Amino acid sequence: MDPQDVLSLCKRRGFLWPSYDIYGGMAGMYDFGPLGVALKNNIENHWRWLYVLQEGFLELSCPLVAPEPVFKASGHLDTFSDMYVECTKCGETYRADHLAKDLHENPATLNEEQLGGLLRAKEVKCPSCKGDLTEPRRFNLMFKTMVGAGKAKAGYLRPETAQGMFVNFQQVYRLGRERLPVGAVQVGKAFRNEISPRQGLIRLREFHQMEAELFVDPEDKTWPRFGSVKGEKLVLVANTGEAKELTLEQAVRDKVIANEVLAYFMWLTHRFAADIGLDPARMRFRQHERTEMAHYASDCWDLEAELGYGWIELVGVADRGCYDLSAHIGHSDADLTAFERFEEPKEVEQEAVKVRFDVMGKMFKGETKAVAEALSKMPVDSLKRRKEVAVQVGGKSYSVPSECFDVCMRREKVTGRKFVPHVIEPSYGVDRIVYAVMEHAFSRSKKEDGDYVTLRLKGLVAPYKAGVFPLMAKDGLDDIASGVHASLSAAGMHAYLDDAGSIGRRYARMDEVGTPCCITVDYQSKDDGTVTIRDRDSSEQRRIKKENVVLAVTRLVSGAGLKALEGL
Ligand code: GAP
């Protein structure tokens, strides 16, 4: 399917369109119109229903701007970059790996030198003017801003909603009654200064995410609800290159998927996508290659959908290990650990930090005692395999090299176990999902629909749940139709009242925006209090009592079909 057909329907019917059009537009930015907002809200609300109501995650809402230390700690300041090349003739910039997409199986895995070498060897030129290209250079994707006047501090627009949840781990853990697993979610905007956003909603500079961060015990990555879904199948393309359809149980047993928690949330992601109308036959999970993985991830699977653009990542489900919490422990004063209290104190041999006062004394002089104390309180995991660690004392940061301490085994009587939780993260891109839902619904449209498209959206996400038409805008039919419309609105259902043009045209207008059913008020309605209700997908109609309209629309929206209207 040509994505332009979908995008032109989106623009024509008020779903979405490129921003700042009257000033020539701005690449990577889209405005959502009334129907797009409604569709997006319906998708987000179903996600909340699943994650907050069914799975018990705690929803947060954090600022869009964060101070620099947050992204220093998270690694985004140093490593969140893509490579670009510039045309030496026309000045156009391109993502270097995108220019190599037909030259290598997975150019995202190549470093600057390899990518530069490949583009040179294949004599790749500027796609628009055929000019020579520069060597690839790295470009940090975060938008920087200054916060406050005078001695303003640097801040960054968040490139993911996730960091807001990591820095709030203490609150989330406390609100979760200091037990693991505990999860937080956030729905909101994220910003990335993408190098060349050219594919509609797929690569934006300002976009929406729905992210869940599940904090788990690293020694227990089992999941209580796994048993209820273990027989479900997913199409998995592991980084060995093989595509297989496996049950979740087989995938975890054969170590294709690393653990039960990751597998469960991959299944939940698949279920969500199917619920909102993505075609399961055009979905798969692809595992990242080691060299492709984000700096924080130890394993990552993308839910991809087959679209007019090819296979596109909609959701990333990653095991982030203890990367994020350890990083924020290392850069702040905060204790972002969890504690498992034993029933009885235990004598255990465990790793402990041993400060080398001889080395430290020479470096930190009068501050040695305070720095050593703060260092000893840090979780051992956050000190291992580090050349130096940042230790906070009274708001000041000290960089302590690894020569100043050893990690050794020590026998101790302990009341519990203190550890840095691991994070499993399903991260959903809303705009890509909105596009995918539109394209899959569009491609279910049948030829015999005539010269207009019937957008076969699932009722759950359809912007309007019903169209309401008086046959004539007179003789009291208009008043009855207004009453029907008001009853649907009062029940929380967005309905569209339309009294203009032929009934056929009115059906067509509603079919084209995916409205699951339409109600027509005619002269018989005045006599016997009935109305007709038409099902979008079969075009069949039934007569029902006016007072049963809300129930009938609810049933059709749920996909129950006209047979579910018997007796109404
Ligand atoms: N917290 C992890 C994270 O942000 P990601 O894979 O970079 O992971 C998650 O992003 C999802 O956000 C992606 O699967 C994609 O759907 C969406 N996304 C990422 N960059 C995007 C962009 N520039 N435009 C639109 N959506 C984007």
Image: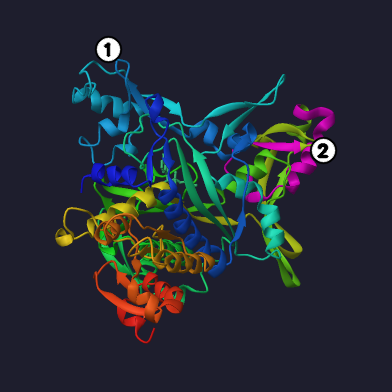
| Whole-percent x, y for residue 166 in the image | 61, 49
Question: Residue 407 vs residue 487: left or right?
Answer: right
| Whole-percent x, y for residue 118 in the image | 24, 28
Q: Residue at x 41, y 59 (%)?
A: 497
Of residues 413 and 494, which is closer to you in this image? 494
Q: Residue at x 23, y 37 (%)?
A: 104
Q: Secondary structure at mark 1?
A: loop
Which residue has dot 2 on it? 370
Distance between mark 1 and mark 2 Cα atoms: 58 Å
* Magenta-colored segment: predominant secondary structure: helix
Colour scheme: rainbow
| Whole-percent x, y for residue 488 in the image | 48, 67
Amino acid type of the residue that numbered disc 1 sits on in the rendered structure? Lys
Which residue has dot 1 on it? 89
Q: Residue at x 32, y 16 (%)?
A: 91
Give residue 364's mark: none
Answer yes or no: is residue 409 visible.
no
